[in-house]
Amino acid sequence: MAAATGERLYWKALIGGSLGFVTFGWDAGVLGGVLLTDEFQSAMGYPDTTTTSMITSVFLLASWLGCMIIAAFGMLLGRRTWILIGCGVQVVGTIISASSYSSGQLIAGRVLIGVGNGFMTSMVPIYVAEMAVVTNRRGQGVNMMIAAASLGTALAYWVDFGMVFAKTQAVWRFPVAFQVFWAFATVAVLYSNPDTPRWFYAKGRTAEADSILERLYGKSITDSKVQQAKLDILASLELERTEAASLRIQDFIWDTSAMQSARRIRTGMILVGMAYLMGIDMIFYYTSTIFEVYIGLKALTASGLAAAATTVLAITNYMGVYWMEKFSRRTWLIVGAVSQTVFMASFTGLLSTPGPATGAAAAAMLFCWIAVFGPTWGPVTYVYSSEIMPLRYRHVGFALSVSCQWVMAFVTVFAGPIAIADPSVGWKTWIWFLVFNVIAIPYVYFFCPETRGRSLEEIDLIFISDSLRGTESAKVLEHTEDRVAVENMAETKDSGSDNAASADEKSSPV
């Protein structure tokens, strides 16, 4: 079979990445619908609230560990390779989890699933973004990853809902075990795909990078459009080599470097971390519990509504994929935060006065909040964070951004149920999430410049200092140089690629 090229190659990357994110969404939702079943409770020895919180939240902490591994060693292997390794680790963890007869065994299995998930969530959006050759599709592609995760959560909840009619251990073991299907499907699609040309250029493997760039564009490397794409990547790498050899800790507080690498990483970390302090993980890990215990609905009704809530998230995520490039990144985030603040405030206020009528209204407000989060803070933070990272530090920056998601999600999923169960706290727990919906508005307005419509390399121009703007590399990214000068630069870069690669390896944090 002929190797995929052009649109087909990109779509394989997009479909494979989407399947990988389905595994993330599946695990985020699969336990939420079975935690209160007798079959699960008996198998785990009727765990208390703290143990149940650990079972659900340890996956998040392990995902953070996976992100840290990528931050340290991500450049040693390709984007695609780490995705495939992540799938393998998840399969092992799923087998252990599905065969569990104690909370300890289940926790051990979920640790492995989490580590694999950390690999995949750190690398899949980068892989998809770097394989996109059409700028106005990049945001849609990364957005589709989050939509796929939401689809995975919805599917898991619907399977859980169907399994409540069973009366055996299959009620929870089958949904947990089925995650291996998505991992194997991801491997099947991505195994024959190459890694990204940007990774190969960054490693100094120019011939391989040229070959993949030709496949992505479906044209020869000598074609003007392909050659310009190559030169943009090389120019971006050259700009990065002009600044300090490594990231400085002080720059994460106040970045004075020429490329603003630390500022860009810090921005991604804050954005993604903030998104997961808004309450989404608390909602989806305990959706059935919220409806049944705190709003007072019957078990079957609560399970059905939980599945419906995850379906709303998936539908609005995919709506966001379609409309992604119609509005700026800042517009999506600011409008989303304002709307979410209104609905979260209403939800919190209604919970403070329990009763059938207020319970139904609270459920409606929760659905509205989910519908807004779906196309805004759910996916756009991933899109923005994957775009603003400099090429050399993209694996570090994005992995650290996603790691903030897992740390914040762990805090909320572990501590949230304990706080809600405390009579002196109860509904007041949701005020914590409301606060972060509010402060997101000024943060985006003052600290997040717009990136829509620019290539990954052109985004460097938003952040670089004035001292770099007059350099030959910056002019290449601005596309103001004449073609002869550009081609001369390309020849210089190619002839020195081995030396450049060596210098890059020395300056890389890994």
Image (tube, rainbow, N blue to C red):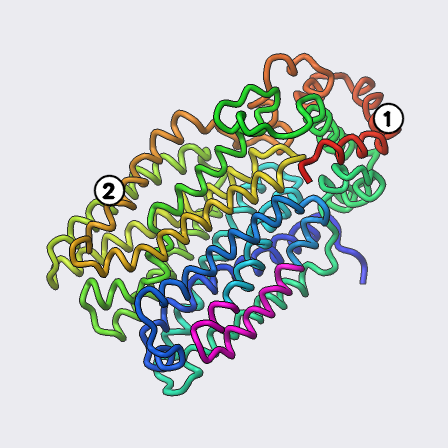
Q: Position of residue 435 (x, y in %)?
A: 28, 40
Q: Quadrant of residue 376?
A: top left
* Quarter of the picture holding the N terminus: bottom right
> Residue 305 appears at what percent x and percent y?
29, 66
Q: Which residue is mark 1?
A: 491
Q: Residue at coordinates 40% horizontally, 25% vertically from top-left?
A: 446
Q: Is residue 55 magenta?
A: no
Q: Residue at x 76, y 42 (%)?
A: 200
Q: How crowded is the residue under tag 1: few (<14 C-alpha within 10 Å), some, or many (20+)?
A: few
Tell me the residue at 36%/70% (across/down). Answer: 33
Q: How many marks?
A: 2
Q: Nearer the viewer, residue 345 or 427?
A: 427
Span colored in magenta: 85-108
In the depicted view, which residue is nearer to us: 284 or 94? 94
Could you tell whether 39 is left or right of 226 in the image? Answer: left
* Residue 376 appears in the rendering: no
Q: CA distance from mark 1 to mark 2?
A: 56 Å
Relative vertical location of residue 118 with respect to residue 133 in this rendering, above or below: below
Going by the numbered disc 1, the residue's amino acid type is: Glu
Q: Tell me if 464 is positioned left or right of 1 in this view.
A: left
Q: Position of residue 507 (x, y in %)?
A: 72, 31
Name the outermost residue toward the bottom. 167
Q: Nearer the viewer, residue 15 or 173?
A: 173
Secondary structure mostly seen in the magenta stretch: helix
Q: Can residue 201 be seen by looking at this rendering?
A: yes
Q: Which residue is mark 2?
A: 342
Looking at the rendered structure, the secondary structure element under dot 1 is helix
Under circle 2, the secondary element is: helix
